[in-house]
Amino acid sequence: MTRLRALVRKEVIVLFGSPMAWIALTLVALVTALIFYDHLRIYNQILFLYATSTMGGFESDTVPDYINLRDTVFFPVMETLGITLLGIIPLVTMRVFAEERARGTDELLLTTRLSPGAIVVAKFAVAYAFVTLAMVVSFVYPAMAVSRGGVGVQHLLSVFVGLLLHALAVASIGLVCSAFTKSQLIAAIAGFAAGFVLWDFSWAGPFVGERLFAVLDAISIHPRYGAFSEGVVRVSHLVYFAGLACVAAALARLSFDWRRVAG
Amino acid sequence: MSQQQPQSAPEGPAEIPAEPAERSREAGSGVRIEARGLTRRFGPHVAVDALDLDIERGTAFGLLGANGAGKTTFIRMLTGILLPSAGTVSVDGISPALDPAAVRARLGFAPETSCLYPELRVRGFLHFAAGARGLSGAEAETAVEASLERFHLEEVTKRPIGQLSKGFQQRVSLAQAFLHEPPLVIVDEPTSGLDPLQQEEVKQVLADRRGRCTLILCTHDLGDARELTDEVGVLHAGRLVAHGPTPEILDRPEPLRLFRGEEDPA
Amino acid sequence: MADPRSNRPSDRPSEPRLDRRWQRWLDTPGLGLIGALALAFGAIPVIWTDQLPVFSLVNFAIGTPILLWVLVRGLRRLRNASAASLYRRTLLRGGALVAGALVLAVAAERLAERSGAQFDWSAERLYELSPAILEGLEAVSAQGPIEAFLYRDAFDPRIRSTRLLLGAMSDTGHLEFDERRLDAHPDEEDCFAVGSSNTIVLTLGSGPPCQRRFERVDRPTEGTLFEALFRMRPFDRQTVVVARGAGEGDLQDPGETGYSGLGEALLTEGYRVREIVLAAGDRIPEDADVVLVLAPQRELLPGSLEALDAYLAKGGRLMAFLEPGITTGLEELLSRYGLTSPDAWVVDPASASLEGDAPGLSPLAFRYAARHPATELLSGNQMTLFRGTRAFELRKPEPEDDIDGLVYSSRRGWLADDPSLTETRDPKDPPSDVTTDYQVLVASGRYPRGENEARIVAFGDAHLASNRYLRALFNLDLVMNALHWTAARDSGVTIRPKNGGVSRGLQFPIPLENTLTLFQGLGLLVPQLLLAAGLLTWARTRT
C-alpha cells in the first residue's frame, strides 16, 4: 500500500505539473459551456417564436413535443460532448505510459519494488480521477442552468453518470494505447481512432449480417451512453463499463510482459 | 545453445537489508552476479551475444563499451526489464527473468539525468523513491534526510528537479539509488554531460559508496572506470571482448581498440 | 577472468526461407503499420459513404496479407527463439489475465442484461411500465407468444428510447424483442406495411411472422404500445350508448372542449359506441351495456328521464357527467338513487387558481375511495383535475344498496351557490353559515334490484373528460376505470401509461438573463480559471 500510495502521489504531481492537463480541463469545460449555451439560446428562440400571439402561448399546446429542454438541449449537447471527449481525453491519457517510456523513467519505476500491476492500478486510478474531475467541472454549468427546467435531479445524475462512464471508457482505451507505445502522438491518435470505432458500430450495419451487427452493437459505447441520457441506468450498462475498464487494465498490464519479450 | 534452467528466489522476495553500510561491508557486502550464455536478439539484430560473466560480491564493476555495444540491454536483462533470448543471468542465484521482484528488492538503479521527473521537487522525489521501495513513515523520513545530507542536496530540497543543474540532477539520481542501502547498485553514465567540477563531486560520492555494495558502472568514459572500479568488462557488438581487473585492461597501450573490437586479449 | 572464447556467436533463429530480395522487403521495419494504415484508409469510405468501393477493396487486399504476414513472422520468431518457453510463459500469463478479464466482463454483462435490473431516473419515469401495460402483456401472452420487431435505420436516434421501452417490456418475460434492419426483410415489411424506421410490429402466435396476428405501432410510446396491446386482448366488445339531444358533449368533436379523446379511449379499450337521441324514443336499446350522459346543457325531456329510470330499474348502468350551474333533471333522477347533487360549486382552498379562474374552483383531487374497484389503484399522489364541479350528498335508498363517494375534495372544501363569491373572498375563509368538509366530487351506487344489478357513476364535472383535460394527470384513468366498473368489466380497471411525449414543464423557457449570467459566471469563468492555473504551472516549470 505504501508503494501504491507513493506512486499515486507522484502521478498526481506529474499530471498537474503539466500544462496539458490544465489545457484538457479547460477545453472540456469551455467546449461544454459553448455547446450548451448555444443550444439553450436556440431553444429559447424557438420557444419565443411559438409564444408569440400568432402562434399561441406556452399554454396552448402548439409547441411540438420534440421542442423541449431534454430533446432540444440536453440530448444534442451530450451527443456532441461525447464525440468531443473522444478527441480531448486521449490528449491526457497519451502521456500516462508513453511519456514514461519516452523519458526513460519507466526503467526507474521498474527497478523499484513497484510491480507492473501496481503501476497499472496507480496510473489508471489517477487518470480516472482526473477524468472525473474534468467531468464534474464541465457539468456544473449545464446542471445549474437546467436544474429549474424540469429535468430533475435524478435525470441529471443519470446523464452525468453516463457522461462520466463514457469519458472513463475513452480514458481506458487511451491508456491501453499509451501503454503499447512510447510515442505520445501515436498514443493520442490510436486512442482517438479506437474510441471512435468503439463509439458506435452503426456504420457497419449495411455490410455485416444481423447477428454480427448485434454483437458489434453490443460492444458499442454509444447505445449505452444513450440510455443514460434517457435517464435509464441499467445495471448491465454499469457492468459493461466496469468490464471495459478491467479489460483495459489487463491489456495495459500485458504491455509490460510484451515489452519484456519484445524489448 | 541449450537453455539453462534459471533459478527463482529460494524463499520469496528478499527484504531490503536495513543495516548500515559498515555492517553490510563487514558481512561481505553486495551480491554475486553470474551470466551464462546470455543472449538477446531484436529481430535479426543480436544485441547481447552469448555473454558469460561473473561479478563477485562488493566489486565495483565497470561495464564499458561504445554506444550500441549492448551495455543497456545487459542491464535491462539483469534488472528483469527484458527477457533473454537465450542463456541465463542471476543475482545471488535468483533469476530476474523468473523472479524480477526478488532481484529488484536488492537493487538500486541510477539512470541518466534525463530519466528523472522534472516536475517533482527533490524531497518529494526522494520520498516517492522511498515509498516505491516500501519505506514508509519515520523509516522513509530518516532515509530521505540521510540521503539529502549524504549527497549534499540540502540546499535544493524544495526545487523542482527540472530546474537543477546537471550535477545536482545526477546527485539526485544517485541519492534515490542508494536511498535504501541496496546490495546492488547500477549507475548509468554517471558523469555524462557534467562539467569537470561536477564530475569530481559525483566521483567523490561514488567513491564513498565503493565497497559497500556491488556497484555496476555503465560508462564509455575510461577515466571514470579507472577511478571508480575494481574490474571492468568491455562489450563490443554484444560480445564480451575483455574482462579483468581494471588496471590490467585499461592500462594497456591502446585500450580503445577494445571498444572497436580490434583486439582479443586472449 | 572469464574465457572470452566461450562467447561464441549464437545460433540464429530460422526464418521463413524466401528469395533474398523478397526477404528484405518483408523484413522492412514498420511493415505492420503499413498494413494497418491500408486497413484504416480502406475503412474510411465504408464508414463515410456506406459503400464498399474499389479503393477500399484494394486497401483491404493489401493490408490484410501484410498484417497476416507480420503476425506469422512474429509467431515463428517466437517459436524459434531459444527462450521460447520463457517468452510464452510470460505472454501467456498476461494474456490469460486479459482473457480472464474479458470472459468475466462478458459473463457479468450478460448476466446483468438478463436480469434486466435498471433504475428509471428519467424526469417522467418513462421506462417504468404502467400496470396497464403489464396487465396487457399478461393478458395477450396468455393467448400465445408475443414477439416485437423493431424496424430501424442504423442512424435513427429515436431508436434509443424505443429500444429502452421494448427492453423494459421484454424484461417482464411476456415478450420477445428483436431488432430488424430496415430493408433487410422486405417480405415482412410488405405484409406489415412498415414504411419507416422506428416502427414496431407486435405479433401474436408462432409460425412465419407474416402469418401471425399483428399490430403495427408507427410512433412507439408506452401509450401507443398499450393501445396496440389492448387491441390484441381478447374481449367481447360492450356497447356504450351515448345520449344526445339535450346539448350533451360530442364524442366526435376534436376541439379542446370536445370529447373525441374519450370516444377514442372507449374504442381502444374495447367498447362499441352508439349514439341515440333520447328524446326521440322512450326506451334505452336492449343491447346497451352502459348509458353515457355527458354534460347535457338543457333540461332533459320527461320522456328521456323516464326511459333512463326504467332502464335503471331493470338493472341498467348509467354514467353521468353533470355541470354546476345547469339543471338538467338528471339531478332528481340521481337523487332517487341516493346521489343528491345540490346546485352549488365546490370550492377547495387546497387548489390554486387555474387559467384565470378564481382560486379554489378547480379542485385538484387526491382523495379516492380506497376500496372501490374504480379508484383503488389511484393513490394520493395521482391527482385528478376538475374544472368547476358540483358535489354529491349520499344516502342509501334501500338497505341493500351500496353508495360510495369515489373522489373527494380536501377537508376544507365547501359549497358556494355563486362562483363569483370566490372572486372577492379568500377560499380559505368561507362564509360563516357554510360548513367545510370533504366534498364528494364523484359518486357511485350499486342497486341490486331483482335479477340484475343497476350501477351508476355520477361526476360533478364534465370538463375533466374533455379533450383539454382528459389526458391531464390521472383524469383518463379515473374516467375509464369508472366506466369499466359501471359496465361490470372490472378487469379493465388499470393505470394507463401517460402520454409518450414530454411534460409541459420541459417546455418552459429558461430566462435568457439567467442563462447569460450563468454562462459568464460558470460556463466561462471556470475554464478561464483553469487555464490561468495551467499557465502558472507552465511558467513555474519554465523558470
Image (cartoon, coloured by chain):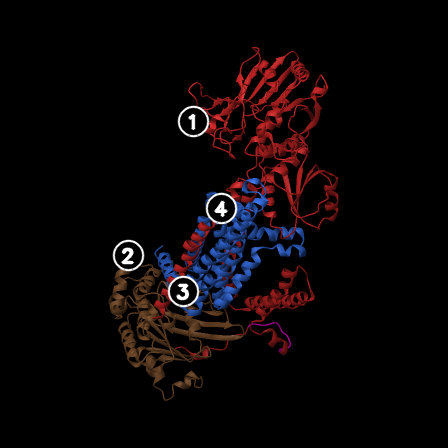
Residue A134 x, y percent position in the rendering: 44, 56
Q: Nearer the viewer, mark 3 or mark 2?
A: 3
Which chain appears brown? B
Whether tag 3 and tag 4 are in contact, CB under 8 A, the answer is no
Image quadrant where residue A103 sits: bottom left
Question: Same chain for marks 2 and 1?
Answer: no
| Alpha carbon separation for disc pair 2 and 1 | 70 Å
Q: Position of residue A252 (x, y in %)?
A: 48, 60
Q: Chain of mark 4?
A: A
Q: Position of residue C332 (x, y in %)?
A: 59, 15
Q: Which residue is mark 1?
A: C428
Q: CA distance from mark 3 to mark 4?
A: 31 Å
Which chain is indicated by disc 3?
A
Q: CA distance from mark 1 to mark 4?
A: 41 Å
Question: Looking at numbered disc 3 in the image, what kind of residue is underneath it?
Answer: Pro
Instruction: In the rendered view, tell whether residue C480 sits above or below residue A3.
Output: above
Labels 3 and 2 within one chain: no
SS at mark 3 in the image: helix
Report whether residue A169 is seen.
no
User: From the viewer's perspective, is the residue at label 3 or at label 1 nearer?
Assistant: 1
- The range drawn in magenta is C13-20
Judged from the image, the secondary structure of the residue bearing numbered disc 1 is loop
Relative depth, front residue between B2 and B258: B258
The answer to whether the residues at label 1 and label 4 have Cβ atoms under 8 Å apart is no
Q: Which residue is mark 3?
A: A19
Chain for colour blue: A
Chain C's colour is red
The kind of residue on which mark 4 rests is Ser
Residue A222 seen in render: yes
